[in-house]
């Protein structure tokens, strides 16, 4: 009988250790996923903010007199950030559509269209950021 009790004790100990290991691994995996989602969310916030800030700066410059070369350089910069927007987006098609509307409005020097496009981009960006990690 003592031998049987010892065997049951060993099996119970091994089983308990195995279950504890599985639970710890699942907890670590969940923490890693949460940290990755937070990093992606921060990246999206920074990228979308950079895009809107660059677009706003360009619209501001359009209202002032500056050379075609300066305008073209600022537009190229905006298009480069637009590429980053698409790369980090949860919904790249939606964000590309919103970013294209901004770029077209800025390129056409249409401030009213820009205001509408910027608002639509902002709303889409908020939804995209909130969707991170879902």
Image (tube, helix red, strand yellow):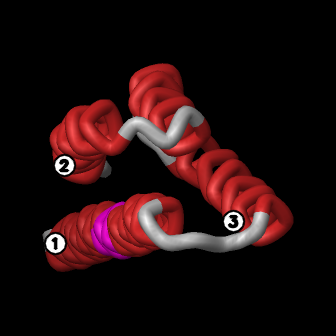
Q: Marks 3 and 1: which is nearer the front?
A: 3
Residues packed near mark 3 inside 10 Å, few (<14), some (14 to 19) or many (20 plus): some
Q: Residue at x 34, y 67 (%)?
A: 45
Name the main secondary structure of what is drawn in magenta. Answer: helix
Furthest-front residue in view? 65
Residue 91 on the magenta segment: no
Q: Earlier in the sequence, mark 2 or mark 1?
A: 1
Q: Position of residue 9 (x, y in %)?
A: 20, 75
Q: Tell which of 15 and 46 is nearer to you.
A: 46
Q: Position of residue 119 (x, y in %)?
A: 19, 42
**92, above or below 114, in the image:** above
Q: Residue at x 19, y 49 (%)?
A: 126
Point out the stretch of residues depicted in magenta: 31-38
Q: Tell which of 86 and 6 is nearer to you.
A: 86
Residues packed near mark 1 inside 10 Å, few (<14), some (14 to 19) or many (20 plus): few
Q: Tell which of 134 and 102 is nearer to you.
A: 102
Instruction: Say if residue 108 shows up in the picture.
Output: yes
User: For residue 126, which numbered disc appears in the image?
Assistant: 2
Residues packed near mark 2 inside 10 Å, few (<14), some (14 to 19) or many (20 plus): few
Q: Earlier in the sequence, mark 3 or mark 2?
A: 3
Furthest-right residue in view? 69
SS of the residue under disc 2: helix
Task: Work out how far the residue at label 2 is from the one at label 1, CA to CA, in angstroms.
Answer: 61 Å
User: For residue 5, which numbered disc appears in the image?
Assistant: 1
Q: Tell which of 79 and 133 is nearer to you.
A: 79
Does 127 sit left or right of 15 as displayed?
Answer: left
Task: Work out how far the residue at label 3 is from the one at label 1, CA to CA, in angstroms.
Answer: 79 Å
Q: Report which residue position mark 3 lands on.
A: 74
Instruction: Say if residue 95 shows up in the picture.
Output: no
């Amino acid at each position: 009988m003592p031998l049987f009790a010892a065997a049951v004790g060993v099996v119970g100990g091994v089983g308990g250790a195995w279950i504890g290991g599985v639970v710890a691994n699942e907890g670590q995996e969940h923490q890693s996923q949460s940290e990755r989602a937070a990093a992606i969310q921060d990246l999206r916030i920074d990228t979308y903010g950079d895009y809107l800030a660059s677009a706003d700066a360009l619209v501001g410059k359009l209202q002032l007199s500056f050379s075609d070369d300066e305008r073209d350089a600022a537009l190229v910069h905006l298009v480069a950030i637009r590429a980053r927007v698409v790369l980090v987006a949860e919904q790249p098609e939606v964000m590309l559509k919103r970013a294209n509307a901004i770029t077209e409005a800025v390129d056409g020097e249409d401030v009213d269209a820009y205001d509408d496009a910027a608002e639509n981009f902002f709303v889409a960006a908020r939804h995209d950021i909130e969707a991170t990690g879902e």
